[in-house]
Image (cartoon, rainbow, N blue to C red):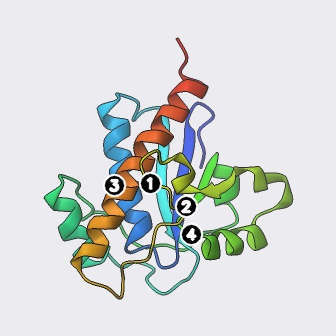
Amino acid sequence: MKSENKIGVIFICMGNICRSPTAEAVFRARVEEAGLAQHILIDSSGTHDYHIGSEPDARAQRAAKQRGYDMSALRGRQVEVADFGRFDYVLAMDNANLAILHRICPQAQRDRLGLFLQYASRHAEREVPDPYYGGADGFERVLDMVEDASTGLLQHIQSKYFKE
């Protein structure tokens, strides 16, 4: 349930075991480093129900751990209609999942939808590729993109909500 004084951010991919939990872990670390953990609600979910209750992919966890991010407590879940009211930023990893979100999101909350990589400054791509069927290098690429976009998203939120 969204707290009135928290900005809500949710990251969404297909199964919630690779890209979106990686984004959740990286963004959470950025928010904690900035001292804003008590002000920002962070979560992740998938558009499909394939991996409800599952821990993140072992390859994603391994790549994240090498960079200092711990994803071990995260578990897969499917996006719910209530999430659109709970989160101010509903950020998809790619256009296919964004299209699904547009279909299930109430009209009044569609302005919350977007692509996560719109906040990236060092990557021209706007979709985070799914590394599931590839090798370890795909998970590294995802982390590079997610770190870039996490920094940009945090800067955006700080400038919008935490102006001094």
**Residue 96 seen in this snapshot:** yes
Q: Disc number at residue 123?
A: 1
Does 57 sit above or below residue 160?
below
CA separation in Å, label 1 and label 3: 20 Å
Nearer-the-camera pick, 63 or 89: 63
Report the residue marked by disc 2. Answer: 126
- Dot 4 alpha-carbon crowd within 10 angstroms: few under 14, some 14 to 19, many 20 or more: many
Question: Measuring 38% from the left and 37% from the top, which residue is drawn there?
Answer: 31
Does 133 sit above or below residue 97?
below
CA separation in Å, label 2 and label 3: 20 Å
Extreme residue in the top direction: 164
Q: Secondary structure under badge 1?
A: loop
- Dot 3 alpha-carbon crowd within 10 angstroms: few under 14, some 14 to 19, many 20 or more: many
Question: Measuring 36% from the left and 46% from the top, which residue is drawn there?
Answer: 28
Report the residue marked by disc 3. Answer: 25
Q: Secondary structure under badge 3?
A: helix
CA separation in Å, label 4 and label 2: 7 Å
Q: Is residue 96 left or right of residue 45?
A: right
Q: Position of residue 105 (x, y in %)?
A: 76, 65
- How many numbered callouts? 4
Say which label, 4 or 3, has the lower sequence index. 3
Say which label, 1 or 4, has the lower sequence index. 4
CA separation in Å, label 2 and label 1: 8 Å
- Dot 2 alpha-carbon crowd within 10 angstroms: few under 14, some 14 to 19, many 20 or more: some
Q: Position of residue 79 (x, y in %)?
A: 59, 69
Q: Position of residue 160 (x, y in %)?
A: 60, 27
- Check disc 4 and give the amino acid type: Asp
